[in-house]
Structure formats: structure tokens, C-alpha cells
Image (spheres, grey):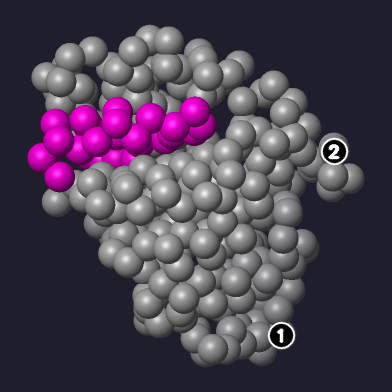
Amino acid sequence: MTVYGVHTGLQHTTVDELVELWRRIEAMGFGWISIWDHFYAADLTGSPNCLEAVACHTALATTTERVRVGSLVYCVGYRHPAVLAKALATIDNLSGGRADIGLGAGWSQIEYDAYGIRFPPVKERLDMLEEAAACVKGLLHDEKTTFAGTHFSLTDAQCDPRPVQARLPVWIGGGGERRTLRIAARFADGWNVPFVSPEQFATKRDVLHRHCEAVGRDPSEIRCAVNVGLAWREEDLEPQFGNLRLAVLPSVLKGSDQEVVDRVGQYVDAGADQINIAVRAPWDPDGLERLANVLGL
């Protein structure tokens, strides 16, 4: 059964606006709400107006009652994986066992530079992602974890109190076919890729499954999700996505109700277990409610 979610960006908004939006999304019948991890607006404009991720993830957990509460995705270059695992175990307790954690290699160099965080080359960032995934998975799923890596290490580390869930889902975000999807095959309970067409999604999902075969993993153990845009009107894209709007276009749900249903069906046919509507301020809850009605949520 396909899950429909909403991925809420944290730029150009307030906590009060987000809480109101999250509660309304839950009431519409969506099964998932997630936040991102950025220090600056993720629209390539250079705007610094953006709320912090762990705090907002916590707020999301405590102001909803039913939906899964996720992160797509925490940047492994911003926090030690043990710090993230500890935060997520607590968020899982706050939510009553509804939390998911997503991890990604990071890409927004403007944030790294502004905050004085070294922006490593791609290979090093992916190495960090692989090590962080091993650490987080161990801390959240096992009683004790020892890990010796180049970037992170743990010695009989324990995450106590434990999460409510015996296996808090760990997601890997990104579409890189050589490294990112192989990391997902090794460590992920869920894989998420943003703003690709149904055809691109199907191709990357096939690559993920080949990596699963190579590492001896059952592909059915990994939930596959895509983030898509929504624009009932063409002019809705630029205020949300700024200079990223062209990159988002391959995924945008638009047109008539039937055209949107047909496009969603293409993602389902391509193997999407979950479809997340990626939205950013200025918010359009009426547009989301229209979509929820069209999908029969």
C-alpha cells in the first residue's frame, strides 16, 4: 500500500506556522510528515532564514499524534552520528514510537562555508555517510556498538533510554548510483530521492536492487520513496523553490485532478512505496487538501 506524505521545508516560516500546518496535514489523512536539515534556505538564493532541524523534528513529534515523523535528511557533516542517534531515540520516545531518521552526505556548500564547517570533496562526504549510517544503525538497533572508522568511532557505545521502536527506521537520501545507492543497500530501511521523474525513479530503484543483490540483501526490506513538487498553478513554484525551481520540474504534480492522479500512478508503477509532497513557504494548505481529496486519503 502506497504511503502519501508531506515533506515540509523549514525556510521563511515560523514555528507557529509550521505547527498549524503539521496539524492540518495530519487531519487531511497523510501518513508521513518530515523536515529537512539546512542552516540556510535550500533555494540557492543565499537567504539565511531557516529553522534548525533537530528542534523542529522534536516539535513535529510532540504536536502530532498519528503520522510518522521523519527527517529527509540529516547532513552527516553537521553532527556526530552518536549525537543524532541520541536525539532520535529521545524524539522516538516523545512521539510514542513514530520517528524515522534519514541521513545524507550534504550538498549546500554555502551553509558549510558560512558556519565554518569544512566542505569535503564528494568521496569524503560519501565515506562519512557510510560510516555515519553504520554508527546510527548500531546505536539505534543494538544494545552496544563498537565502530572504528576514519571519521567516526564508537567504543561499547549505548543509546539509553532506548527508542520505543525495536527497529527505528534508518533512511538514506540521494540518487548517486555508484556509492549512495550501495550505502542504502547495506544500511537502509528506507531510501528517498527527490525531484526525479517516474522514469528516473524506476532506473535508480533498479540500481538499488542490483546493489542489494551484490551485498546479499533482500530489496523488499528497503522502502523506496520519492519527493515531488506540487503546483496547481505554474506561478506557485518560484516562491517556494527560488533558483532550484528548474531542478524540481521533472517531478512536479500539475494540471487537472486526473492528470495529477495519473502522474502519481506513474510513480507507483515505477515502484514507489511512498510519495512525499515537498512543500515550502509560502504555504498552500488548501492545495494539499485538494490533493488529499483527489487521492482519496
The quarter of the image holding the C terminus is: top left
Q: Residue at x 61, y 16 (%)?
A: 243
Q: Would residue 54 be found to the left or right of residue 206 on screen? A: right
Nearest the viewer among 10 and 86 is 10
Nearest the viewer among 31 and 3 is 31
Q: Looking at the picture, how far across and down is residue 216, in whole percent? A: 36, 61
Query: What crowding class fits label 2: few (fewer than 14 Cα within 10 Å), some (14-19), or many (20 or more)?
Result: few
Q: Are marks 2 and 1 in contact (CB under 8 Å)?
A: no
Q: Would residue 123 be found to the left or right of residue 186 on screen? A: right
Is 240 placed above or below 22 here? above
Amino acid carrying label 2: it is Ala
Question: In the structure shown, which secondary structural element does the residue marked by tag 1 occupy?
Answer: strand
Q: Would residue 33 be found to the left or right of residue 56 on screen? A: left
**Disc 1: which residue:** 155
Is 86 placed above or below 170 here? below
- The answer to which quarter of the image holds residue 170 is bottom left
Q: Residue at x 38, y 18 (%)?
A: 250
* Nearer to us: label 2 or label 1: 2
Question: In the structure shown, which secondary structural element does the residue marked by tag 2 occupy?
Answer: helix
Nearest the viewer among 85 and 223 is 85
| N-terminal label among 2 and 1 | 2
Query: What crowding class fits label 1: few (fewer than 14 Cα within 10 Å), some (14-19), or many (20 or more)?
Result: few
Number of marks present in the image shown: 2
Segment tinted magenta in the rendering: 269-297
Is 139 placed above or below 240 here? below
Q: Which mark is residue 114?
A: 2
Q: CA distance from mark 2 to mark 1?
A: 33 Å
Amino acid carrying label 1: it is Thr
Is 154 placed above or below 261 here? below
Q: Is residue 293 magenta?
A: yes
Q: Looking at the picture, how far across and down is residue 78, in whole percent? A: 73, 54
Q: Would residue 60 be found to the left or right of residue 43 on screen? A: left
